[in-house]
Amino acid sequence: MSPHKLVRLLASLVVVVLMVAPALAHADPLDDSVRRVALQLQCPVCEGESVADSPSGLANDMRSVIRAKIVAGESDRQILDEFVASYGDSILADPPKRGISLGVWVGPVIGVLLGIALVTVLLRTWRHAPLHPVGGETVDPEVADEFQHFREEFGR
Amino acid sequence: MAALGQICIVGAFALALYAIVSSVVGVRVRSGELVASGQNAAWAVTGLITAAAVTLLVAFAVHDFSLRYVWDHSSRAMPMDLILAAFYSGQQGSLLYWAWTLSIFSAVVLWQQRRPGPHRVLMPYVIAVVMAVLGFMALLLGFVASPFEALPRPPADGVGLNPLLYDEGMRIHPPMLLAGLMSWTIPFAFAIAALAAGRLGNEWVALSRRYGMVAWVILGLGNVLGAWWAYHVLGWGGYWGWDPVENVALMPWLVGTAFIHSIQMQERRGMLKAWNLILIMVAFFLSIFGTFVVRSGILASVHAFALSAIGPYFLTFLTLAIVGSLALFFWRLPHLRSDNQLDSLLSREASFLINNLLFLGVTFAIFWGTIYPLVAEALADQKVSVGPPYFKQVAGPLLGGVILLMGIGPLMPWRRASRDHLMNSFMLPVTGAVVGLAVLAVLGVRDPFAVLGFGLCLFVLGTVLQEFIRGALARHRATGENYVLALGSLIRRNKRRYGGYIVHVAMLLIGAGAVGSQVYQQQTQATLAPGQSVTLGAYTITAHGIANNQLPGVNVTDGVLSVNGQDLRPQKQVFDNFPQQPSTKVGLRSTPFEDLYVVLAGWDGDGPNAKVSLAVFINPLVSWIWAGGVLLLLGTLVTMWPAAVPARERVTAPLPRGAVGVTS
C-alpha cells in the first residue's frame, strides 16, 4: 500500500472516530447510580426483565427504595444484600457465585476447557501422525514381531 | 373451514409417511418408480400444507370466528394486514407457518435439484428427512395443537391480537425468525442423506453449504429484526435482553456460523469431515429446540414444561432425531478420515478451528445459562435467575475473540503462513487501530471495555479495507481498468470471498453499535408539569401535557413533547380487549450516531394540563446495528449470487452412428 493510501485509510478512521464523539456527555449521576443497582436486580413479578427496565409498579417502587438508600449513603453492595435478605438469591440478575447458582458459572468454564483440550488433541494428532501415511504402509506391530522372531530363529 | 383444514393436515401427515417409506425403500431396492413416487408424494405434501395454510388465511380474512384460533387472535376492528399477520401470532398458527415455509423450501430444493447428477442419489434420503420433520409437524397440527379446532357456537367478534404484536415489526420479524429456524432442516437433510447413502464426498458439502447460507441469512435477519422490534415496542431502552426466547433463536445461528466457516475446511482441504456433520446436526437440533421454546414458553418453569401439550411430543421427536443421527454418524465414522494434516498453527486451518471453538463455546455458555433455571428447579427445587449480566460476562469475551479472529483468519493463507506474510498483512491494520484508538482516547473514549471493543472493530475494518484496496490495485495494474471498475470486477470474480468480507463489516457495525450503546447509554426519568423541561445530553425536552384519542378498539394517549423546539410524541395504547396490557410506542429521534428514545411512562390529569412521567434514554450507535442488518443481507446476496450463465452451451446433438468417443 502506497503512503497516500495509508493517509486515506487513517483519514477514514478519524471520520469514524468523530462520528462516535457525540456520545460522550453525561447525565445526572444519581440516575446512573439507581440504574446501575436496578440493573442487577431481577423484577420479581415480570418475565426476564430487570428492575431498571420493568414498567411494573413494584419495580417502580423498588427504584424509589434504591434511590432513597443511595441518598442515605449506602453502598451498592449493602443495597443488593438487603434485597437478597428479603427476596432471596433469585432477586439477583447476576446469579451469585455460591450454592446452586455456582453451577451456571462453572458450566461454561468446563465447556470451554474441554473444547480447548479437544482442539489441542486434534492439533497434535494432525501434526504428528499423518492419517494417510505417505510413502509406504506402516508396519503392523504383530507382523513386525513375527518378522523379528523369524530372523532370530533362522539366524538372520 | 375447520373440516377442510383438518383434512389437508391429516392428508399431509399420511402422505409424508408414505414419502419416507417409498423414498427409502425405493433407493434401497433400486426402484426408480418408488423413488419417483416418493418425490411426487413430497410435492403433494407441499400442496396440502399450502392448502391448509391458505384455508386458515381465508378464515382470518372472512372473520370466521367458528375457528377457535381465529377468534382468539383477531377481531373485526383490526386492519387486514394485521389480521393476516395474526396467522402466525399464536402457537398453532406459527407451527403451521413453520411447516408451510419448510414445505415450500423443500419444493424449491426439489425443483433446483431435478437435473440428473451425482447428487441425485442423495435426494431420496433428503426427501425422507424433510418429510419426517414435516410429518411430525403435521402430527402436532392435526392431533395436538390444531389451528382448525372449531368453537360450538361462533361468537360475534374475536378477542384480537396481543397488544405487543400491534407493530410494523410484527409483520416481518416472527415470520423471518420462524423461517430461519425451519430452514436449517434442509442442510441437515443433506448431511443425513450423505451419511445414509454413504456418499461422503463433496456433493453434500456443496449443497449443504449453499442451503446453510440461506438458513443463516434468514435467521440472522430474523434476529436483527427481533432486536429492532424489541427496541421499538418494549420501551426499556434496549434491543437485546438475553431472554430465553431471544437466546434460543441466536444459538442455531451461532452454530450455523461455525458450520458455514468450518465446511470450507472440507471443501478446500478435505478436513473436519466428521466435525462438520456434527455441527449441522447441532444447528438443526437447536433450531427444533428453538421453535419449541419460542412457541411454548416452557423455560419459565418445569411446571410450564410439563403442562405444555406439545412439550412431550417435541421432546420425543428431538430425542429420536438425536439418537438416529448419531447412530448413522457412528456407523459411517470409519469413512470420515481426514485427507490432510495440519501443517502449521499459523494457517487458515488453525484459525477455522479456533473459530469453531469460540462459536461453540459461546453457544454452550448461552445454552447453559438459558436452561440452568430449569435444571436447578428440577434437580434441587430451587429458583435461580440468570439475567443479562451473566450472559454479558460469559459471552462478551468469547464474542470479542470472534471479532479478533475475523481480522486474523481471512488473512491467513491455507497450510502455512510465513513471517513476512504476517508482517505484510497485519502491519497496517494494527497501526491503523492503534492510531484510531489514540484519537478516540483524545476524544474521551477511555472506558476499557469500549477501548477494547472499538479497537478490535477498527483492526478488523483495517484488514478488510486493506484486502479490498490491495485487490483493486492489483487488478488495476493487471488489466488497466480504473479503480472503481477494478473493485467491481474484483468482487464479481470472487463473490464468496468479498461477499464474506462485506458480511464481516456488517458484523463490525453490529459489534460497534452494541459496544457504543452498552457503554455510553445515558438515561434519566422525569415527571414534568406543562412547560417544565428535562435535559439529557444535547436534548432539552419540554412537556405540553397529553392528547387522548379513542380510536376503534383502542385508546391512544400521546405525550405532547418538544425536543429542542421540534415535536415528539411517545404513545401509550390501551386496547379495549386487553385493559391490563398497555403497549408502548417509543418516541424516537434517530441520527446516525445516537438515538433519543423517550417513553411515556405515565401521566396525571388530562389534556394540556396533565403532568407526564417520562423515561428518557440516549442510545449511541444503535442505528449501526440496523445498518449492519442491511449490510448482512447485501453481503450474503453477493456471496450467493449465481455465476453468470456461461456463453457456451452443452452440445446435445446425438453423435453420428458409429462415432467413436467417450461419453460421460
Image (cartoon, coloured by chain):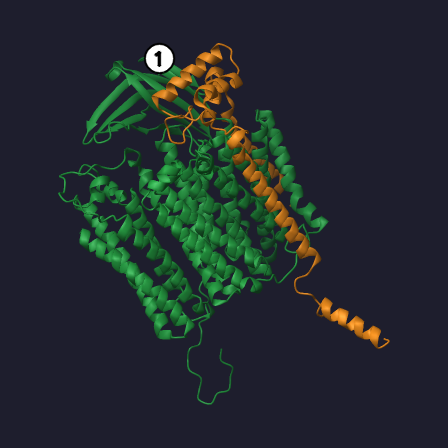
Chain colours: A orange, B green
Residue shown at 47% from the left, 90% from the top = B658
Q: Identify the chain of the residue marked 1, using the numbered disc in the image.
A: B
Crowding around mark 1 (Cα neighbors within 10 Å: few <14, some 14 to 19, many 20+) is few
In the image, B317 versus B530, the foreground residue is: B317
**Residue at image mark 1:** B532
Query: Does residue A124 sit above or below A56 in this rendering?
Result: below
Side (left or right) of B579 relative to B455:
left
Amino acid type, callout 1: Gln
In the image, farthest residue toward the bottom: B658
Based on the displayed image, in which of its 4 quarters is residue B126 positioned?
bottom left
Q: Is residue B76 above or below residue B563?
A: below
Q: Position of residue B311 (x, y in %)?
A: 36, 45
Identity of the residue drawn at 57% across and 43% down = A111
**Percent of width and height locating residue B58:** 20, 49
Image quarter hosting the C terminus of chain A = bottom right
How many labels were placed on the picture?
1
Does the rendering let one see residue B489?
no
Q: Is residue B61 visible?
A: yes
Residue with the most extreme top position: A72
What is the x, y in percent for residue B375?
46, 38
- Which is more toward the observer, B306 or B257? B306
Most foreground residue, B627 or B119: B119
Q: Is residue A25 left or right of residue B551?
A: right
Q: Work out whether residue B507 or residue A133 is closer to the camera in this orientation and state it.
A: A133
Q: Is A68 on the left-hand or right-hand side of A55?
A: right
Q: Is residue B257 above or below residue B452?
A: below
